[in-house]
Image: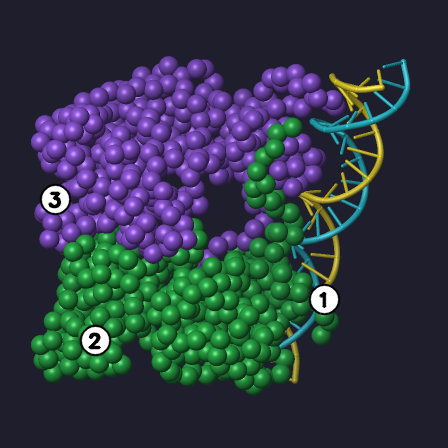
Chain colours: A purple, B green, C cyan, D yellow
Amino acid sequence: MTTIRPGASVARQASLRSGNLALVLRTVCAAGEPPSRADVAAATGTTRATAARLVDDLVAGGLLDEVEQAPSGRRGRPATPLAPGARVVALGLQADAGLLAARVLDLRGRVVAERVEPGDLRASDPGPTLARLGDLAAALLGELPGGARLAGAGLALPGIVDVEGGLLLRAPNLGWSDVRPAALLTPPLPVELVLGNEADLAARTVAETAPARPGPHRDFVYLSGQIGVGGATVMGGRVVSGSSGWAGEVGHVCVDPDGPACRCGSTGCLEQYAGRDALLAAAGLPRDAGPRELARRVADGDRAARAAVERAAWALGVALAGVLNVLDVPTVVLGGSLGELADLVRPRLEEDLARRVLSARWRRPRVVAAAGAPAAGATGAALRALDAVVAEPARWLAAAESPPP
Amino acid sequence: MTTIRPGASVARQASLRSGNLALVLRTVCAAGEPPSRADVAAATGTTRATAARLVDDLVAGGLLDEVEQAPSGRRGRPATPLAPGARVVALGLQADAGLLAARVLDLRGRVVAERVEPGDLRASDPGPTLARLGDLAAALLGELPGGARLAGAGLALPGIVDVEGGLLLRAPNLGWSDVRPAALLTPPLPVELVLGNEADLAARTVAETAPARPGPHRDFVYLSGQIGVGGATVMGGRVVSGSSGWAGEVGHVCVDPDGPACRCGSTGCLEQYAGRDALLAAAGLPRDAGPRELARRVADGDRAARAAVERAAWALGVALAGVLNVLDVPTVVLGGSLGELADLVRPRLEEDLARRVLSARWRRPRVVAAAGAPAAGATGAALRALDAVVAEPARWLAAAESPPP
DNA sequence: GGTTTATGTTCTACGGCAATACAAACCCGA
DNA sequence: TCGGGTTTGTATTGCCGTAGAACATAAACC
């Protein structure tokens, strides 16, 4: 007998149903206006009968809501508008060098509740810090409206993370190594806590404005300007996480091999030119100044500030040109403190990219700023948990059925 | 009525069948030894009855063959071994600066016929060159055994390609721009010719040793050392082609912004250090010398040759560290002339990567040489066409049914 | 108030896979 | 030589999900 690798499993009729449930739910989530069953049928290419059956199951499981119909003035039987289930929510957490954040989103992408607590967490102690974050989370979950069902929780961390193992391997800016946040988060959460890289999760908020609703860009490189520079790549609306989930470290792309030494052991990393600490130091500003102060000085004509920003733009051009040559994405999204400097670096950066990117003569790369909501990582963490539900509604329905309502 | 973006279409029962046909075919292709129907059932998780039904359809369509059973000595009814259909073949072509190649592969990954014609095609005229390639292809197709059915054809080109449009936008080493090869290839092929980047297609030969049979590496960066340096990224066994198919231009990652000017308009591109022309020039060798001559000189202790290789290894370290930081893949595969120099550059390159790649302390990147078959691009082009059949056997079966055998 | 129009529901038909039983082909041992 | 054991391949039945068509419903239009 030949032994064959397990491989994928066959598609049974249940898989068919499961896939179509996901398709219907995704369709409703992606729609701008609440669609009717007939709209869903048209968009998915199925019959009204089948679409209705799938919608009914999703409504029964709370994943879709039948919302109040506004008088449309159109003739024919009035439609029943459908919206993603408002009672399905997820918790997103973020611990960063500059803040602790907790945010609850519902399936429609609305912020149900949030707490953001600024503070300097550089070189902090993981235990007390995560206990504070746990308190924030508990307070948030306590004030949820009745009937809300928590679909999952995520934690965005500025470092290298072992997602399967639930382990933060190293977060240089926090000074943390080998931390298991789920164990330190008190009181414990009622659902599993999934870790994630801050930039990966923040990029998700650009890729989708609400669970399964596509954002303005589908293919882009995201740069998260923090104390260092984090990054993520999104292709086809999905974050490219690499074979171990450590992709996107654009901050450590080498810009100049003869450049300054970096904490990571290499030399001339992008972070040494465009990271917040590096920028502020080059501009002669104190470490706790913000990007706005830097932007103000540039506007005032401060020479050191101008030079620092110019140098950052140059470094971004070298590093991002390499990334764009390798990945072929049309857009660079600047987030975090880099987002606040986007207008200052864009002219030079776009020009450099046009010169250095091989395919620029056929499609010129663009640089945009992320719509800067604070603690985007927390939002992204909640989005990821909700996306998991949208991807496999059948699992959710099965879980919801075991305890009868 | 709300208009919703088309989105994906629902899964019908036909999709179920189509998906399972693909799964069965993929399973047989991936297996090392010809499996029986019962093996297929076990590997896919379905019943013997269903597996047999699917296999029968694939056998009827020629996508699977029932091969001769060798006496196994095991008790029980002897199994009927299954192998990918030998009569399903595809044509792969390649036009490169150093050769023209045509190769026919069957669904088992065997070379059915081939022609490789060396020659210097730098700054050549596309018309006559492609006519020569067309002659090669016609000769090859003429000598195919009776009953062979051509599933598709592909052409590997060292440049930027518009795959949908069938247009070669620019191939600097050939000196070609805006060429439409399908129109210049005489006599015309009996199937559609799909273009592809040479490095992308060569990388495919590393990702799979035969159609749908996984190769030794599933996640890697492939570097194709030609006159310049092409590249491709493979993640999860799939070539990452980017949003327009122009990904993988590792050769134009900036290694040193103050380095020599590159044809592409940038400065200090990797190609200026590790491309064949650059390497040979730095070693003081004539342009038409090969990488073996260079390797021989290094072994003989030639100082200029050693310095050239050392410099290339340094540049590869800087560029690939950036790529690995962004993509998180564990392996670098060196192909083409770089493959022949792999043993010379590996020590320094692996050391530099270990220092510069952020995740190296958890998983140290490895550098390997591609098993160097000449004209890997042609093989990859044929593989791609065969993979398309494996991915959608139902389409092939439908097409095979319309003209009855 | 009848007609038109669009939505939502009900019912039957068809196709695909699961489960089971059964037939076929080989090895083994008496 | 022949029956038991074993594995493979095939036939039959039942379940399930979608397609298709007919029907019911609720509004606007005339």
Q: Position of residue A280 (x, y in %)?
A: 13, 32
Residue at the disc numbered 2: B280
Q: Is the C-beta separation of discs 3 and 1 under 8 Å?
A: no
| Horizontal side of residue B182 vs A148, given as left or right | right
In the picture, residue A282 is in which quadrant?
A: top left
Q: Chain of mark 2?
A: B
Where is residue A179 drawn, in percent x and y? 20, 37
Quadrant of the rendered image containing residue A44: top right
| Inter-mark Cα distance, 3 to 2 | 36 Å
Quarter of the rendering occupied by the C terminus of chain B: bottom right
Type of residue at label 3? Arg
Residue B143 point in image, percent of width and height: 56, 86
- The residue under label 2 is which amino acid type? Leu
Of residues B84 and B285, the one nearer the viewer is B285
Q: Is residue B330 visible?
A: no
* Labelled disc at residue B402: 1
Q: To which chain does the residue with label 1 belong?
A: B
Instruction: Residue under label 3, please give it.
Output: A263
What is the secondary structure assignment of the residue under circle 2?
helix
> Disc 1 marks which amino acid?
Ser
Q: Chain of mark 3?
A: A
**Residue lying at the far front of the rendered structure:** A301
